């Protein structure tokens, strides 16, 4: 469980996060939604300690990040897996080397064991014949899947995904959503996903945090998002005709 | 870590051998020819050609000017590769995993460049060899006279001085471009700008350190 209390973050005097509090639960897929530029990535990076918030606290199962010493911070980070918005694969390494990287850095496993684990997670993301390729030689969707494989290879307790399925075709997008949900439940991970894909919200939105202009404008789950009267949510989620119709049908039932 | 160091040695040191050898050989040759052409007074002995070639190659050309050239070659390679990792969030990815990214990226380069003096040693040798070939085959001087000149008034401390400079330049070459890449902000365009800025600062520092070290070690 990750507890966020009142965090604020500015860049050169420009306040991006204006005091956000929420709880991300363990074993659930927690979604952060909101318009482009609403601060989703900044929030995620603040949770990860890439950005340092000016105020507020973030606690990982009781461990308050800002109060940890550098060793404890590193220790905590080895429990975190992150899928970046642009994948952030190491471009001098092959797919298999990328995925095995956290294991080589942080475990004493021998090569054979690492290779087995790499094979296993790559199979998990439905990539079986890309081991020896470089990131520049595979498609964007494959890169995303490699990034997910790298994020889960060391059995993280916390998984963060910044738009894991943006730029993917609908089939692959759903495959990835379901994969993340499955892994979250199977290993009881605390998963936080940034998205503006409404399909994901409807598929895996067990807890949804809606950001607007750096503030928490709404939170709930995917059933509640159908019923809410919150204007900002309705304007954002039901801006497409398709979802408007889905909502009407849902409310009639 | 061992693999990373070998990779840096390959990229930075081995990868520069060709260009360093080429430049040293021909510049050594030109130094010899220029000296020969300027020795018009028959009272000045010919072996000065060998002497002048040795002094300028060993004391300045190989350690200092090759390093300025390497500030362009190695420096822009280091800045752009680390800078690209910064803008594509690869450095953030390292940090999130709990890797000390600054250490991980810069330390292997510093270790690899401990071999930089070998590169400069080769430059010294090839520079003098180039001078000898240009002098002898250009018909300016006999082989024996040139070799005699290269051995004249040899001061062992000059070699120590040249290699102290080299080692310090190596550290400048490893660190300044790394920091320019590591602390850059922006996108692909800024990577290019950072490489240029890093070249300017690295070469300016090399020239300044050269002045200071020469004053400290040889002056007074
Ligand atoms: N490193 C930074 N320095 C300065 N400003 C930043 C930085 N990172 C983000 N911002 C600003 O913070 C705001 C929120 O950006 P953020 O990347 O969090 O948006 P987002 O919700 O993730 O959008 P998208 O859906 O397009 O990814 C933007 O106005 C952006 O310009
Ligand atoms: Mg974003």
Image: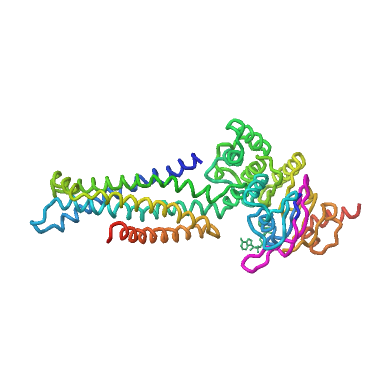
User: Residue B31 at what x, y percent from top left?
Assistant: 22, 54
Task: Kindly tell me whether residue B155 is visible in this rendering.
Answer: yes
Range of residues picked out in magenta: A4-30
Q: Residue at 60% across / 50% down in the picture?
A: B95
Overall secondary structure of the magenta section: strand
Q: Residue at 62% across / 36% down in the picture?
A: A118
| Residue A71 appears left or right of A207 | left
| Residue A215 appears left or right of A102 | right
User: Residue B63 at what x, y percent from top left?
Assistant: 32, 52
Is A19 magenta? The answer is yes
Q: Quadrant of ligand 1?
A: bottom right
Name the outermost residue toward the bottom: A13
Q: How is the image coloured?
A: rainbow
Is B127 magenta? The answer is no
Task: Kindly tell me whether residue A199 is visible in this rendering.
Answer: no
Identify which residue, A219 or A78, lies in the foreground.
A78
User: Residue B87 at what x, y percent from top left?
Assistant: 56, 55
């Amino acid at each position: 469980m990750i507890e966020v209390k009142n965090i604020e973050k500015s860049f050169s005097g420009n306040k991006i996060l204006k005091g956000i509090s929420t709880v991300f639960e363990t074993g659930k897929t927690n979604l952060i939604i909101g318009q482009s530029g609403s601060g989703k990535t900044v929030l995620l990076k603040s949770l990860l300690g890439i950005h340092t918030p000016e105020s507020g606290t973030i606690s990982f199962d009781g461990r308050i990040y800002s109060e940890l010493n550098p060793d404890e911070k590193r220790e905590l980070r080895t429990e975190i897996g992150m899928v970046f918005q642009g994948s952030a694969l190491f471009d001098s390494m092959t797919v298999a080397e990328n995925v095995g990287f956290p294991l080589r850095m942080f475990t004493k496993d021998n090569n054979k064991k690492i290779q087995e684990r790499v094979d296993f997670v790559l199979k998990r993301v439905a990539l079986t014949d890309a081991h020896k390729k470089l990131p520049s030689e595979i498609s964007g969707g494959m890169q995303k899947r490699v990034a997910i494989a790298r994020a889960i290879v060391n059995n993280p307790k916390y998984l963060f995904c910044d738009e894991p399925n943006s730029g993917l075709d609908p089939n692959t997008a759903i495959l990835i959503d379901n994969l993340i949900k499955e892994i979250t439940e199977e290993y009881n991970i605390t998963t936080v996903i940034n998205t503006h894909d409404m399909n994901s919200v409807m598929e895996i939105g067990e807890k949804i945090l809606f950001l607007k202009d750096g503030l928490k404008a709404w939170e709930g789950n995917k059933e509640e998002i159908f019923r809410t009267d919150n204007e900002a949510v309705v304007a954002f989620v039901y801006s497409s005709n398709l979802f408007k119709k889905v909502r009407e049908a849902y409310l009639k039932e | 870590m061992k693999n990373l160091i070998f990779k840096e040695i390959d990229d930075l040191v081995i990868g520069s051998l060709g260009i360093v050898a080429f430049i040293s050989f021909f510049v050594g040759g030109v130094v010899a020819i220029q000296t020969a052409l300027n020795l018009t007074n028959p009272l000045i002995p010919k072996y000065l050609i060998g002497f002048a070639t040795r002094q300028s190659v060993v004391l300045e050309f190989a350690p200092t000017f090759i390093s300025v050239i390497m500030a362009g070659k190695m420096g822009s390679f280091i800045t752009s590769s680390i800078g690209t990792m910064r803008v594509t969030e690869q450095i953030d990815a390292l940090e999130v995993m709990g890797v000390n990214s600054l250490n991980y990226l810069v330390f292997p380069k510093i270790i690899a460049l401990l071999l930089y003096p070998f590169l400069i040693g080769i430059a010294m040798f090839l520079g003098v060899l180039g001078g000898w070939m240009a002098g002898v085959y250009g018909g300016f001087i006999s082989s024996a006279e040139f070799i005699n000149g290269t051995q004249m008034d040899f001061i062992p401390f000059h070699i120590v001085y040249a290699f102290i400079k080299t080692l310090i330049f190596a550290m400048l070459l490893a660190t300044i471009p790394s920091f320019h890449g590591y602390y850059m902000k922006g996108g692909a365009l800024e990577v290019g700008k950072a490489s240029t800025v890093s070249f300017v600062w690295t070469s300016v520092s090399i020239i300044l350190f050269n002045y200071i070290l020469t004053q400290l070690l040889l002056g007074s």
